[in-house]
Image (spheres, coloured by chain):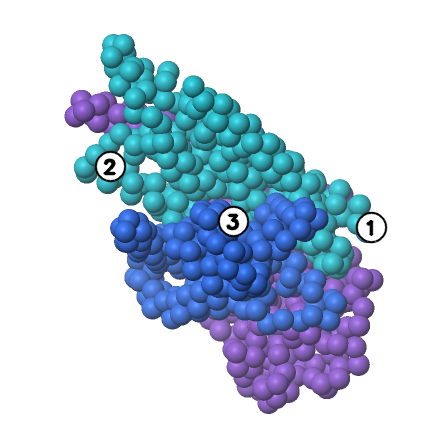
Amino acid sequence: MNFNLDFAIASLPIILSALGTTIWVTIVSCLGAALLGFTFEILRRSSRVMSYVMRFLIDFIRSTPVLVQLYFLYFVLPFYGVTLPSYVVGILGLSLYYSGYLAEVFKAGIDGIPSGQFEAAHALGLRRLDIVIFVIAPQMLRNIAAPMGNYFVSILKATPYLAIIAVPEMLGQAMEIASDTFRYAEPMLTVGVIFLVLAVSIAQLVRLMETRLLKSAKR
Amino acid sequence: MSFVEILAGIFEGFGVTATVTLWGMAYAVPFALVFGILQHFTTGPARWIVTAIIEFWRSSPVIVLLFVFYYTLPSFGITLSGITVAAMALGLNIGGYGSQAVRAALQALDPGQVEAGRALGLRRLHILALIELPQAFKAMTPTFINQVIQLIKGTALVSLITLTDMTFRAKEISQLQYDPVGTYSALLVAYFIVCYPATILGRWVEKRVAVSERTRGEF
Amino acid sequence: MLNMTRRLTIKAGLAALALAAFAGSGPAALAQSDAKERLASGTLTIGIHNRAPWGFRSSTGEVQGYHPDLVKAALEPLGIKNINFVISEFGALIPGLNANRFDMIASGIAITPKRCQEVIFSEPDLAVGDGLIVKQGNPLNIHSYADIASNPKIRLAGGRGTENTKNAIAAGVPQDQILQLHETTDLVSAVLGGRADAATLSAPSVVSLLQDKNVKGLERAAPFTGLTKENGLPSAMYTAIAFRTNDAALRDLFNERLAKLKADGTVKKIMETYGFTDAEMAPEIKTADVCKGD
């Protein structure tokens, strides 16, 4: 059985047609993970009990493979009446899984804000919600931009798992070609090359952004 | 099948999970050390090549690496056993991340240490082995434990290339007897049982390293 | 520093070589071997997709099923004492065979012209049709692929890479009405969970799936018309054992033995064990003709 380069090249446009799906799923999952992660972190700081509960919840999510979490959400939830479309399950699964990691990023980001800021805010009599939105969030966002960028790349590399729950992203597209022609070798290599190029390029962009942010921080 | 029976059935796959994890570490640790050190010391075109190799393993999605090694390589005449494919793909991917941790740990060391070593007349390689690495190891231990946990979670993917690990056993059980709720819940619990102790251990080690770093600084 | 870089690079080269050698000496790399060698070694590896009655792993850990039993009956007298098996999802069986992961596919794979381009088949051993799983009571009154094609709201679930899915497409069901999943039990989950209204599998698989006492609330759509030929007769799928294209010697050996087993009634006995009736007996059709698209 020999490798057929023409077939590999012919697979390229078909697989790339799913690039859009891969990208938007990544973006939405990243936002979802950020939202959940931020919420978890704020909750964790709210009370001592909550800090233990959140710590355990995050540990549970991080101690199990994301693939298994996806299987669970896809096959078990319908039993309890919750049947979500594949891509929703996928985005939910990725958001949940990465929220644990992003909660840590937010923690570091918030911890990096000088404590004088909080004291000043309290002195000014700002409400808790206002402090979060107007004092914590903007400064934290600068601190976390670079790690967030890295997690964006991680989430991008996790989107192929969604092929197993029938989301039409790039690996799923490669598998369709494979099941049509009974040849895995060529579509798999093609999708591998695509992901490699994508991940490396985006990682470079993140690094560039990191450098620029560092420069602007030295005011 | 009761939940406990399902759990027991899933743990039948633990042998494969453990085997792939151990062999994976056998690839990950040498790779991380060698390439982390190389990246720290080399410059110019050599560094470019080293970085390219690291990025290849680090930036490819693991699931795609597995499929390419399993299905594409044989069409080039290279047929590796399933376990080898799993260990190499997972191990070298984790090793790629590990190399960054090694490099960061080496960079974080006080350059005074190296100068002192040179003043004492030690050869560069000896300085590396006797002075830099031991200190770097201490800093790297929490990350190392994290990587092991990542590896264990990554083994869930090998079920997709027909290796009979815990995830595979779960799917098998669900073929013999249709019970997705019991099966996938049990699978989550199984991974939690394996990974959570490691997570706790990692956190404990992290605290101890932080304490010892702090006490060392006070002098 | 230049000296340092050179020495480090040499060390890296050695390390890489060591890793490569390690890869070879690690858990055994699979080697290709000749059919005769394999027969002589007494061990064969078959690929199955873990579905009754085709090829599955029993609770005692052995491989069972119509096709594994057929292979055992055919090749044991020739010296095969040990049959190992690899469980793969159905759509990955042919790629796995061609990636040298096993020596033959013994798991209810049907002969189709497209598959004939990638593998070689033995002579047919069974003729089967498609079956449809629907919710209890068949609320949407589905009795054929045509019914599904004519109602865009009906969602069909099919296995990735299976001929049943391809039959549905050939019978006119649009691809975006079909949810392609990897595992057979996923198809059942899909109908139960409301992700699909029907699931298509080979009739024997449907029967065995519905026999599981944990599966409640589903039934087999009856009557059901699957893919029909131009003359209106139902199109049948002929199952056979698949081999790599360079394993013709092994395939021919198997065919010889299969002919003998058909003649002395062993095939009929194995059929009965797994619930097949005379209706499913393979007619006197040749694989070469099926490959051409009969």
Residue A95 at what x, y percent from top left? 54, 60
Q: CA distance from mark 2 to mark 3?
A: 34 Å
- On the question of residue A1 being in view, the answer is no
Residue sitting nearer the eye, C258 or B160: B160
Left or right: residue C108 compared with residue B186: left
Q: Give the labeled residue for mark 1.
A: B2
Q: Give the labeled residue for mark 2.
A: B47
Does the residue at mark 3 contact the one at mark 1 (Cβ under 8 Å)? no
Left or right: residue C253 compared with residue A178: right
Residue A86 at what x, y percent from top left? 57, 69
* Residue type indicated by callout 3: Lys
State the purple chain.
C
Residue sitting nearer the eye, C35 or A8: A8
Q: Nearer the viewer, mark 2 or mark 3?
A: 3
State the blue chain.
A
Q: Compared with residue A63, is residue C227 higher up or lower down, i.e. above or below?
A: below
- Dot 3, crowdedness within 10 Å: few (<14), some or many (≥20)? many
State the cyan chain.
B
Chain bearing tag 2 is B
To the question of a shared chain for discs 2 and 3, the answer is no
Furthest toward the bottom, the residue is C150
Left or right: residue A219 compared with residue B65: left
